[in-house]
Image (cartoon, rainbow, N blue to C red):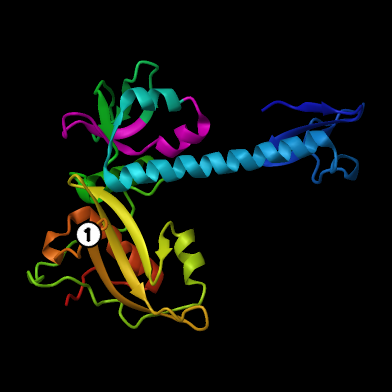
Amino acid sequence: MGWLPVGDSYEISLVDGKVAARSTGPRATGRPLKTLPKALRDTSEVDRLRQLAQWLDRHTAECLARVDAWVVSSLPVPTGLLARVWPDPAWRDALRDLVVLGEDPAESGFLRDVTDGGDLRVVNLDGETVRLSPASATLPHPVCLPGLTDLREFADELDVTQRVEQLHRGTWGKPASLRKRDTTVTDFRGARVPNRLAARAATLGFRVSGAQVKCRVWEAGHTVEAALWFDEDYWDSEATLGNLSWSVAAGPPLRLTEVGPVAWSEGMRMATALSGALTGSGKAA
């Protein structure tokens, strides 16, 4: 944004998300001052700029959370919607360089631009910039991406940085040893977590409900919820984790063999993050 005059000697602006000032006197260098002058700190102009900075921070976080939800659930997003939000820097930063799929699963690439008409400009695995014109586009969860290893290697070659975890999001595959009667994963049972479990869960994007930490995904036409149990006395001591299970929202537990690949991966990711475990399998019971 531009610089706004305050009084006769200063201008203020947002620099890297913070209020900064520069002198406008005859010896001014045009560079921001290292600290905000005391005479400006309580002015209405600085206060309004601080409020704008806080709103922009919230807006950025909301954009990242929304795009993350699209990725986690591999939801098709109308390209007309992408065209409307793309001019906004917060939305653009959240979306840029994510792998998108068009109507043809073979049409994939790193999103670089969206035209006013909803066309997508992507860089494909051949390194070519191509235009896709689907009615909707999918930002797939990595377990749903064909050629994930090749995409990861190509992203490293391009030095791609994704604001929303997609290609380098931790993934867990279902073990082949699951039995049809199994309904819980016991890998994390007995793990000890510091008493700020609720805050830690919220920071990681999960929610606490009763004696469970939960995350939800949309998969195969259903909302599926992964739930990790913990003891209810965690306010007074360390939390002790229990079993991990999945269910269709507000429904009975699913058999582990019925859990889809995205819901499985996200549930294991949640439990691993909270427990600090390094496991890619899942002991079942």
Q: Is residue 104 magenta?
A: yes
Quadrant of the image occupied by residue 51? top right
Q: Which residue is mark 1?
A: 251
Q: Amino acid at mark 1?
A: Gly
Toward the top, the furthest residue is 117
Asked whether residue 186 appears in the rendered view, the answer is: yes
Q: Position of residue 74 (x, y in %)?
A: 26, 42
Using a 10 Å C-alpha cutoff, classify the residue at mark 1 as few (fewer than 14 neighbours), some (14 to 19) or many (20 or more).
few
Quadrant of the image occupied by residue 32? top right
Measured along the vertical axis of the image, is residue 89 above or below residue 54? above
At a point 24% along the width and 68% down the height, the residue shown is: 245
Toward the left, the furthest residue is 180
Q: Nearer the viewer, residue 26 or 54?
A: 54
Measured along the vertical axis of the image, is residue 2 above or below residue 165? above
Q: Is 114 left or right of 285, judged from the image as shown? A: right
Q: Position of residue 56 (x, y in %)?
A: 60, 38
Q: Position of residue 284 (x, y in %)?
A: 17, 75
Which image quarter is the N terminus in? top right
At a point 31% along the width and 48% down the height, the residue shown is: 72
At a point 40% along the width and 46% down the height, the residue shown is: 164
Helix, strand or loop under label 1? loop
Asked whether residue 126 appears in the rendered view, the answer is: no
Q: Is residue 127 magenta?
A: no
Q: Position of residue 10 (x, y in %)?
A: 86, 31
The residue stretch that appears in magenta? 87-111
Measured along the vertical axis of the image, is residue 138 above or below residue 250? above
At a point 31% along the width and 20% down the height, the residue shown is: 119
Q: Is 191 left or right of 182, judged from the image as shown? A: right
Measured along the vertical axis of the image, is residue 138 above or below residue 284? above
Q: Is 215 left or right of 3, judged from the image as shown? A: left
